Image (cartoon, helix red, strand yellow):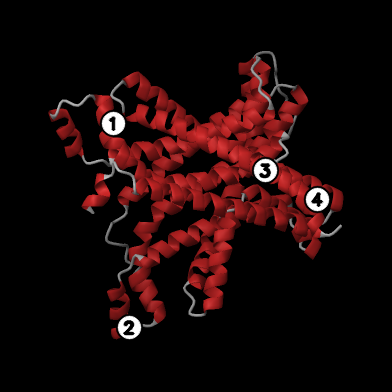
Amino acid sequence: MMYGYAWDTTTPLTFAISILPILGIGLLVTLKAAAVGYAIALVLGLVLALLRRSRFRIVSWTVAGFTEFVRDTPLLVQLFFLYYVLPDFGIVLPAFMTGALALGLQYSAYTSEVYRGGIDAIPRGQWEAATALNLSRLRTYRDIVVPQMVPRIVPSLGNYLVSMLKETPVLSVVTVLDMLGLANMIGERTFEYLVPLSMVGLIFLPMTLICSALIYLVERALPKSGIPLR
Amino acid sequence: MTWTQYLPPLLKGAQITVTISLASIALGAILAFAAGIARTSSNRILSGIAFVYIVLFRGTPLLVQLFWFYYALPLIGISFDPITTGIMTLSLLTGAFGAEVVRGALLSVPHTQLEAARALNFSKSYTLWHISMPQAVIEMMPAFGNLAIQNLKDTALVSLISIADLTFQAQSMRNITLDSATVYTLTLVGYFIIALCLMLVMRFIEKKLRRGPAFPRSAHS
C-alpha cells in the first residue's frame, strides 16, 4: 500500500499492473526533476559560455577550468557534495531542488560547450562585417549569431536532454521519491524486486526512444541556413 | 582529524574505482566491436540481436540496470558478487554506446574501397579486418575517449551496490567525521585526476594508432 494504491502480488502481471499508478507518481517527479534541471543547464550553460569569451583571462580561464572539472567528475559525488555541504553554509534546500541543481550544474558544463561550439562556428568575417557596419553587440548577437547558431545546437542540446532524463534516477539516492526510489521501496516491502525494477526500465525505454525520435524530427525540420528571430 | 588522514581510505577506494573502470572499459570495448560489427553485418539475425542489445542498454538508466542485475536477477536464481555485477553492468552499457561508435566509423569508410575489395575478390572478413577496420579505428578514438571518461564517472554508481570504491569510501568518511566539504572536495579532485590520466592514456593510444603501418588515410590527407 502506497499513496492509497494497494498491490496485488498473486502473479507478476497483476503485480506489474497494480504498481503502475504508484510508478506514475514517481514518473511525474522524474519528469519534473529533468525539466527543472534542464532549465538550469540551459541558462547556466549560456552564462558559462559567455563568460568563457570574456576579455579578462582570469575569468575565461577560471570558467574553462570549472567546466572541465564539472564535466570530468561523477554526478553522484557532485550530488552528495551539494546535499551535504550546502547546509553547512546555511543553504538548506529540499532534496528535490538539490537534485535538480546537481543535474543542472553537471549538464551546464556540457551545454556551455555546445553554445561555445555554436558561437565559434560563425565565420570571423561575419563578426568583422558586423563591426564594420557599426552594429551594436546586442544586434550582432540577436540578428547574426543566434539565428545561425540555433539549428546547429538544437540537436546536441536535445541529446543532452535525453541523457539527463536517464540520469535522474540517481536522485533517488538522496531520498527523492522518483520512479526508481518508489520501485525500490516497493521492493523493500514486498521482497519482490524483479517486477518493479523491470517496470522502471520498461517505462524509461519508450520515453527515451520517443524523445530521440522527436529530436530527430526537429533537427530535420530546422532550416540549415538559420532562423531569423524577427 | 586533518585532511591528510582522509587520504589512505580514499586512495584505497580510488584503487577499486580504477580497477573497475579499466576492466569495464576493456570488456566494453570488446562488446562494442562485437555488437558494432554485428550491426553492419548482412546477417539479419546477428544484426537484430545487436540492435536489441544496443537499444535496451542505451535506452534505460544505468542505475536501473545496476539495481536490476543486483537485486532482481538473484530472484530468478542468477547472482554474482557485487564487483562482478558492477563490472558486467558497466561493460554492457559502455559496449552499447561504443557499438554505435564502431558502426558509425565502419560506415564512414568510403564505399568505393569496399567495391574495390570485392572486385579484387577479397573475402568479407579480410575486407573488414584489413581494409575497413584499420581506418575506422582511428575515427573511433575521440568518441572512445569520451566514453572512457563517461565510464569512469559512471563507476561512482557501483558504490550503491556496496562496492567500496572512491565514492563509497567518501560516504563512510563523511559519516564518521561529518566534515563533508573536505571529504567531497578531495573525492572530486580524486576523480578529476583519474580522468586526466585516462585522457592522457587515450591520447597516447590514438597517437600510436595514427603512426601504425596500416594507415592509408593520413597519407592522403
- Using a 10 Å C-alpha cutoff, classify the residue at mark 1 as few (fewer than 14 neighbours), some (14 to 19) or many (20 or more): some
For marks 4 and 3, give the one nearer the viewer.
3
For marks 1 and 4, give the one nearer the viewer.
1
Measured from the top left, where is residue A27 in percent x and y?
Answer: 61, 39
Task: Tell me which amino acid carries mark 3.
Answer: Gln
**Secondary structure beneath disc 3?**
helix
Q: Are marks 4 and 3 on the same chain?
A: yes
Label disc, if present, on residue B128 of the rendered structure: 1
Q: Quarter of the image holding residue A154?
A: bottom left
Q: Which residue is mark 4?
A: B174
Q: Are marks 2 and 3 in contact (CB under 8 Å)?
A: no
Q: Are marks 1 and 3 on the same chain?
A: yes
Measured from the top left, where is residue A186 in percent x and y?
Answer: 72, 28
Residue A40 visible here: no
User: Is B79 placed above or below A83 here?
Assistant: above
Give the letter of the chain under mark 3: B
